[in-house]
Image: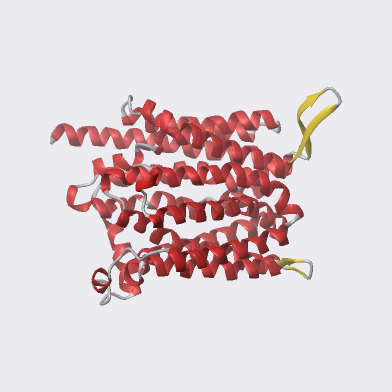
Amino acid sequence: MKWREWDRNLKIRLYGEGAINILFWMFFPFMTIYFERSFGKDYAGLLLVLSQAFSVVASLIGGYCADRFGRKKMMVFAAIGESVTFVLFAAANSPWMDSPALTFVSFSLLGVFGAFYWPASHAMIADVVSEKHRADVFAVFYTSINIAVVIGPVIGSVVFYTYRFEMLIAGAVITAILAGVLAYFLEETITVKERVKEKGKGAITAIWEELSAYRVIAKDRTFLLFIVAGIFVAQTFMQLDLLIAVYTSEVIDKQKLFEIGNWSLTLTGEQAFGLVLAENGLLVALFTVIVTKWMNQFKEKRVFILSCVFYAVGITLYGLTQSIWIFLLAMAIFTFAELMVVGIQESFVSKLAPEDMRGQYFSAASLRFTIGRLLAPVSLIVSNYLNYTMTFLLLGFFAMCGALIYVWMFTRLDKREGGA
């Protein structure tokens, strides 16, 4: 689908959301470090679990609200909410106030408003793009996110610690501008007639129906194993802005990355983490298509299992060193594990799902990330009682458990298909 064929709504959002994503990645990865230093690992872990719980609840009703009130209204509402929250966030980190508690409230509210924004955003793409071009458009938006992951952490590794108040004020201004642009230029893509269908359904009913869809996993044991394996593996890749962030910031004080004659490039722990995170985003942006095409040549069983093995190697290697260069090597392995499955996961869910239940299956499949995201911050608490090395080894063990569950799942799947 050529750029000139894109709907105006999509062009506006691509630029607007691109700016917001860069802003987001300037502070989000460093919040775990901030909370750990403010509250300690135990409380930081519990608070991050609580924050994710708020976002999960919001995401359950985000889709309902997008259908009930319209895509445009929800996106404008969420952008206004983010702008107000950034003002609160800035106040908590201003020259006149330093409040970690208010910072946590602001951080959680940003997660909630984001959970309201993104279902409407994705639904709008489905509204205005034909099915044959939809994957290409989503890929462009996905690429823009990964460009933000490259740029944001590098800037944030300096700005977050030096100019946090100014950065958050800029966030309030940028999101306010985005809200104004969306309100003035965006066109609603869902009709009143379509919204009427949802009027007799309350928010509680919508949440209950969403939760009821997950009952499908109790009836399909093969699919249940897929969910459980995904939750185990999620404990590794969800650590990118959690345990990996805290560990990198603690073990690196000032370490030389390059030295040429009398000149050297020295990084602090926070800057090293920003570099590692940027590496992840850059590799994803550059190699997603290439690796996906490569992986399509192999059987799904081999790809899923080897992805778990690479996750285990990457996360374990990361915890066994304090060298920036080994961190970069470990992150390359870690990212390759991510890229191996990014292109085949959705098609695999489609393969498992009966044709008349695909919506329920995709909804239930998201539990891999929902539950994984809720459990991942517990690693911070664990690292407070075990040492970092043992915690990283435990995460590597979880990834290998995921591999074993995939072996079990594909064994069941082969028997089911053989008996069909």
In the image, residue 2 above or below residue 263: below
For residue 327, above or below residue 127: above
Task: Judge whether 189 appears above or below 226 on screen.
Answer: below
Q: Nearer the viewer, residue 409 or 73?
A: 73
Q: Is residue 228 visible?
A: no
Measuring from the top left, give residue 162's x and y in whole percent: 76, 53
Residue at point 73%, 48% (across, down) = 158
Q: In the image, 408: left or right of 59?
A: left
- The x and y percentages for residue 100 are 69, 65
Give the image quarter of residue 420.
Answer: top left
Residue occupying image coordinates x 72% and y 60%:
166
Quadrant of the image occupied by residue 292: top left
Seen at 69% across and 39% down, the residue is 272
Q: Is residue 219 visible?
A: yes
Q: Is residue 106 left or right of residue 178?
A: right
Of the pair 344 and 43, the residue shown nearer to us: 344
